[in-house]
């Protein structure tokens, strides 16, 4: 069966070599289009016969690659025919409807033109229908290929072989090893016999060896020289870190130099040997596969060195100790070396046609060793975390690594070797991508946060080059940095998912087939759908919080907006992100948002009364955030609760009183009730100081003193000037009132207190009295018991302070 499929794929490839050059040109007329569509249809029929449940994944991938350009060609043909059909339809409509049978005939030229346009329209319509049918057929073929390929991969991943602890695995590998060695010897003899037949092989071999030596020596010498030339820590203290921007530049530069040298040298050697025909086709393909493994090792090792810097603390990006950095670097190097060695051995196994048990043993050993290295690393970091000396990795990362390591080790021990190998290879690839992303993000953050500041020479130069004001430079840098971070995240996500790609789909399909679901009417919800929706919701909410924090802490502080508007923008952005995450999660479950709206409308009457207060507060919160009658930082008085607005949320507003107590006020109270806002339009506020002076005081002098004391205070504005009003003639004093405007409502009470102190001092210095309230009291004694003349004769009054005229004063 496999032999027949291989012949089929070879035949299809040969047919496509004849078809694709013709399809590379854009069709010019209907006859060419019809011919091409017929050819594409024949190829689709040919591919359809080659898709079977037992097709190998490599053959299915080649079939997919074969029909992909044909599908694109059909799409281009449709895109070219649709405007032509629309143009003909417009011209036919411009001629108007054809005359009825009993109506007079139209002119001959119009009838000929109508007939000609109708024929062209019918021909193009037929081509369009044929092309659309082929487009649908191509989509169906691609879906079938993907479905079969996913099923094959899923079956392979969950295929149970032998445990790594099973002696049969290693005994079988030991029995198969001599056969593989004999195959290697046989291929080596064939290669030697083929190469020996070349004329002048000795001279060619000598020249090739010399060229390889020169190339490899030159590459590594250039790497060493450039690394020393660009070294930034020369003359710098060994225990002091370099500035962040210099460390980031050094990490990027050393990562590139370290990642290029070894793969480039290996590739040059391959190309030199191939140019002298010392590598036959099979050996060349195997060498390219080993080159991929070498590249994996070199890139990972270079990134680990750039991040950890075991012997170079000044340029280290991670804030960890020297011994921890050296230990992590060693473990990372061992893991990469094991992964690269295992991948290379599997390539050699397949090239030599080794038994499957050899590949199984190699994959099991590779996955098991990498899992052990991960566990060993985590155990080493645990002691540092327990002692509190440092935290080499976040808690969530350690938890994820523990889970992955246990799953890999458990898969190897239980016999799911292919699943363990799959997870191990994807883990190594994802770790390399994440490390590269970290280095690039570190450079972006350092460059835009430090290099493009308004007070630096680089920042001023960049502002003049771009043509923006220096004051707007930090805002532009924050926006550029945000856009660059998003771009880097998207590229990293595609690189990681592109490697997992369909494999994740395969695993998901397997879990979906194995798991039960929930039936809700016509909607079937599997555990995979529910888990995916929950994951989408969690990730969406997390990303919306990141966006909200980025706006609140990075972008908006660099704008000229006031604090309340910044808070409103960040809050609304967070709400939009959460709503979008909920919508996407519901769509992931297969729920139609229109149906949800209908159900919500039907239930709104029943639950409206129960949720009336919540909805009212929610709507009031949106009004507060958009109209902003009350802003964060305002000084307000709501039903006797006076203080500062600290936070405005969807449901309530937090007001901090002058006693440092937090009062939570529902938003509906702020919309429906009267609210005193001292700082709604500006910060200035008016205060008044009431004072009474004795009747014998000089009123003009009192006025001048009050105005002078007000003008002397630093928080009293000169414009509008302070004024003094003579309010009334009181019972005991001349009542006056000083009114003045202070520059901030936050200092009304303290300013009033300072003015009271200064006015009292000035009055005393100028001999102006502030009288007590006085009241005369007369006691009438008609019986004469008090003796003497009760109406005024008080010479015999007892010494009790009580006189017929009343006490001297009463307060």
Image (cartoon, rainbow, N blue to C red):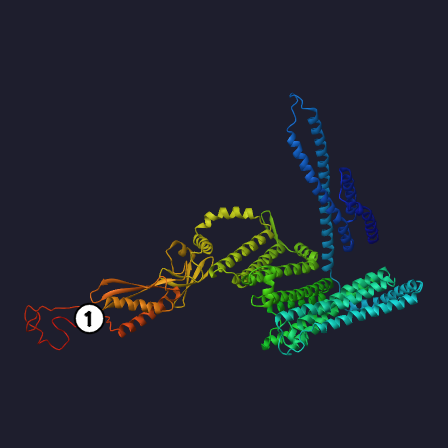
Percent across and percent down for residue 675 are: 38, 57
Percent across and percent down for residue 331 are: 70, 73
Q: Nearer the viewer, residue 425 or 564?
A: 564
**Pointer 1 residue:** 810
Residue 140 position (above or below residue 264): above
Percent across and percent down for residue 234 are: 67, 77
Q: Nearer the viewer, residue 10 or 176?
A: 10
Question: Which corner quadrant of the image does residue 651 belong to?
Answer: bottom left
Judge left or right: residue 460 versus residue 92.
Answer: left
Question: Which corner quadrant of the image does residue 746 belong to?
Answer: bottom left
Judge left or right: residue 758 versus residue 344.
Answer: left
Q: Which quarter of the figure is the C terminus placed in? A: bottom left
Number of residue marks: 1
Residue at the image position 68 percent from the left and 60 percent from the top = 496
Residue 397 position (above or below residue 608): below
Judge left or right: residue 44 versus residue 556.
Answer: right
* Secondary structure of residue under mark 1: loop
Q: Nearer the viewer, residue 490 or 535?
A: 490
Question: Which corner quadrant of the image does residue 170 belong to?
Answer: bottom right
Whether residue 54 is visible:
no
Whether residue 318 is visible:
yes
Residue at the image position 73 percent from the left and 39 percent from the top = 130
Percent across and percent down for residue 778 are: 12, 68
Give neighbour class at mark 1: few <14, some 14-19, many 20+ (Cα, 10 Å).
few
């Amino acid at each position: 069966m496999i032999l027949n499929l291989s012949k089929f794929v070879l035949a299809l490839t040969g047919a496509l070599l004849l078809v694709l050059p013709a399809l590379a040109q854009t069709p010019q007329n209907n006859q060419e289009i019809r011919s091409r569509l017929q050819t594409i249809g024949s190829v689709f029929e040919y591919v359809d016969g080659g898709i079977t449940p037992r097709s190998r994944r490599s053959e299915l991938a080649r079939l997919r690659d074969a029909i992909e350009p044909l599908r694109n060609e059909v799409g281009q043909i449709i895109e070219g025919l649709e405007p032509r059909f629309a143009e003909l339809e417009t011209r036919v409509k411009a001629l108007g409807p054809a005359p009825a049978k009993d109506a007079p005939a139209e002119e001959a030229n119009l009838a000929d033109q109508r007939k000609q346009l109708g024929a062209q329209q019918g021909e193009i319509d037929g081509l369009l229908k044929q092309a659309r049918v082929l487009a649908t057929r191509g989509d169906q073929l691609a879906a079938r290929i993907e479905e079969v390929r996913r099923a094959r991969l899923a079956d392979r991943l969950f295929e149970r072989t032998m445990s790594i602890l099973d002696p049969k695995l290693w005994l079988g590998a030991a029995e198969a090893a001599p056969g593989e060695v004999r195959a290697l010897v046989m291929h080596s003899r064939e290669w030697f016999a083929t190469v020996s037949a070349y004329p002048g092989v000795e001279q060619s071999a000598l020249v090739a060896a010399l060229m390889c030596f020169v190339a490899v020596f030159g590459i590594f010498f250039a790497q060493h020289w450039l690394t020393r030339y660009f070294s930034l820590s020369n003359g710098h203290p060994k225990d002091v870190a370099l500035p962040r921007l210099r460390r980031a530049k050094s990490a990027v530069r050393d990562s590139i130099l370290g990642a290029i040298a070894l793969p480039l040298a290996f590739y040059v050697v391959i190309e030199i040997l191939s140019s002298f025909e010392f590598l036959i086709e099979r050996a060349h393909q195997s060498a390219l596969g080993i080159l991929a493994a070498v590249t994996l090792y070199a890139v990972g090792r270079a990134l680990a060195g750039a991040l950890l810097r075991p012997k170079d603390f000044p340029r280290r990006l991670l804030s960890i100790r020297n011994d921890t950095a050296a230990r992590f670097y060693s473990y990372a190097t061992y893991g990469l070396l094991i992964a690269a060695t295992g991948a290379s051995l599997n390539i050699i196994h397949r090239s030599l046609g080794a038994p499957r048990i050899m590949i199984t043993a190699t994959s099991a050993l590779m996955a098991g060793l990498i899992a052990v290295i991960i566990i060993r690393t985590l155990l080493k970091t645990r002691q540092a975390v327990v002692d509190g000396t440092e935290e080499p990795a976040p808690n969530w990362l350690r938890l994820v690594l523990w889970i992955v390591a246990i799953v890999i080790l458990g898969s190897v021990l239980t016999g799911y070797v292919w699943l363990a190998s799959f997870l191990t290879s994807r883990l190594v690839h994802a770790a390399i991508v994440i490390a590269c992303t970290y280095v690039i993000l570190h450079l972006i953050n350092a460059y835009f946060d430090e290099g493009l500041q308004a007070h630096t020479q680089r920042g001023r130069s960049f502002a003049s080059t771009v043509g923006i004001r220096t004051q707007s430079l930090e805002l532009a840098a924050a926006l550029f940095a945000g856009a660059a971070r998003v771009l880097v995240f998207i590229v990293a996500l595609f690189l990681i998912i592109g490697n997992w790609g369909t494999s994740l789909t395969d695993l998901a399909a397997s879990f979906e087939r194995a798991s039960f679901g929930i039936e809700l009417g016509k909607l079937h919800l599997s555990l995979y759908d529910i888990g995916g929706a929950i994951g989408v919701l969690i990730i969406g909410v997390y990303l919306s919080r990141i966006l909200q924090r980025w706006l609140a802490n990075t972008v908006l502080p660099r704008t000229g907006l006031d604090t309340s508007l910044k808070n409103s923008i960040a809050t609304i952005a967070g709400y939009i992100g959460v709503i979008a995450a909920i919508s996407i999660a519901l769509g992931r479950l297969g729920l139609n948002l229109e149906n949800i709206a209908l159900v919500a409308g039907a239930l709104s009457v029943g639950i409206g009364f129960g949720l009336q207060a919540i909805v009212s507060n929610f709507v009031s919160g949106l009004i507060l955030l958009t109209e902003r009658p009350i802003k964060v930082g305002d000084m307000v008085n709501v039903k006797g609760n006076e203080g500062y607005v600290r936070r405005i949320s969807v449901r309530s507003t937090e007001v901090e009183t002058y006693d440092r107590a937090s009062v939570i006020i529902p938003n509906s109270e702020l919309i429906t009730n009267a609210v005193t806002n001292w700082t709604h339009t500006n910060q200035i506020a008016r205060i008044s100081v009431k004072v009474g002076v004795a009747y014998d005081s000089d009123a003009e002098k009192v006025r001048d003193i009050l105005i002078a004391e007000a003008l002397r205070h630093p928080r009293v504005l000169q414009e509008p000037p302070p004024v003094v009003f003579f309010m009334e003639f009181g019972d005991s004093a001349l009542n006056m009132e000083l009114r003045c405007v202070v520059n901030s409502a936050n200092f009304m009470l303290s300013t009033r207190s300072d003015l009271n102190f200064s006015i009292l001092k000035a009055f005393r210095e100028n001999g102006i009295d502030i009288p007590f309230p006085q009241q005369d009291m007369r006691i009438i004694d008609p019986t004469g018991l008090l003796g003497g003349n009760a109406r005024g004769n008080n010479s015999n009054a007892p010494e009790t302070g009580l006189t017929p005229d009343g006490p001297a004063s009463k307060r």
